[in-house]
Amino acid sequence: MALPKRRHSKARRSKRRATWRASTPMARVLCPHCGQAKRPHRICPHCGHYRGEEVLLVKEA
Amino acid sequence: MRHQKDGRKLSRTASHRRALLRNLTTALFEHERIETTLAKAKETRRVAERMITYAKRGDLNSRRLVARVVQDRLIVRKLFDTIAPWYESRPGGYTRILRTRARQGDAGEMAMIELVKTAEQKAAERKRIEEAEKAAEKEAKAKAKKKR
């Protein structure tokens, strides 16, 4: 079976891992109704509004 | 080759998929708004819209075509007698899909699919719900008094 012949240095390992970057942050917009951050094109989880005054989810206390 | 093969498999066998879409479509007509995954909602839309188009035709043949999918007599009746008249003048686009949240557990994209309604219909519904809530509250209070 194939086995590594030599130990890889820390520098080599770090160089390889240098490309592992966090992906771009999740998109956020401010809800036009309650002003809290929410994901775009989704019903606001804080106030249940989407597109104008469309109240969709019943507000929890 | 998958040329011209449309639709999603939804990780199911053909019969499982058929049963799932039947159930989802029936549930949509029963409850008028249901929450499911985005992919299932989009597949349900295809079936449900076709059923409404049949229901608008209203003849016996279309009723039988719908009954093949919606296997609940009462819901077929509701679709033909109650739902179809809402869309008399709407050329398709009877349903609306709204994205809601990421499901707890697997972060699946959830969405709501609902039958499109006019502002008046929505206002009337809201009123009915509020009144029912008030009535329930009153009843609960009355019960609490009796116990004492």
Image (cartoon, coloured by chain):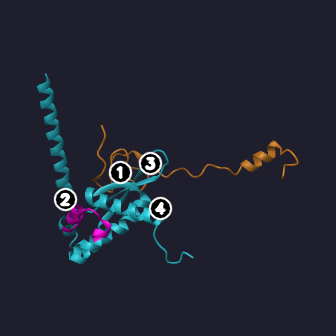
Q: Name the mark nearer the viewer: 2 or 3.
A: 3
Residue corresponding to mark 3: B103
- Assign a secondary structure to mark 4: loop
| C-alpha gap between disc 1 and disc 4 | 34 Å
Q: Chain under label 3?
A: B
Amino acid found under the numbered disc labelled 4: Leu
Colour displayed for chain B in the image of the structure: cyan
- Answer few, some or many: residues within 10 Å of disc 4's Cα (few below 14, many 20 plus, some between 14 and 19): few
Residue drawn at point x = 15 percent, y = 45 percent:
B131
Q: Name the mark nearer the viewer: 2 or 1.
A: 2
**In which quadrant will I find the C terminus of chain B?**
top left
Q: Earlier in the sequence, mark 4 or mark 2?
A: 4
Determine if the magenta segment contains residue B70: yes
Question: Between residues A25 and B38, which one lies in front from this camera angle?
Answer: B38
- Residue B44 falls in which quadrant of the image? bottom left
Q: Position of residue B10 (x, y in %)?
A: 47, 61
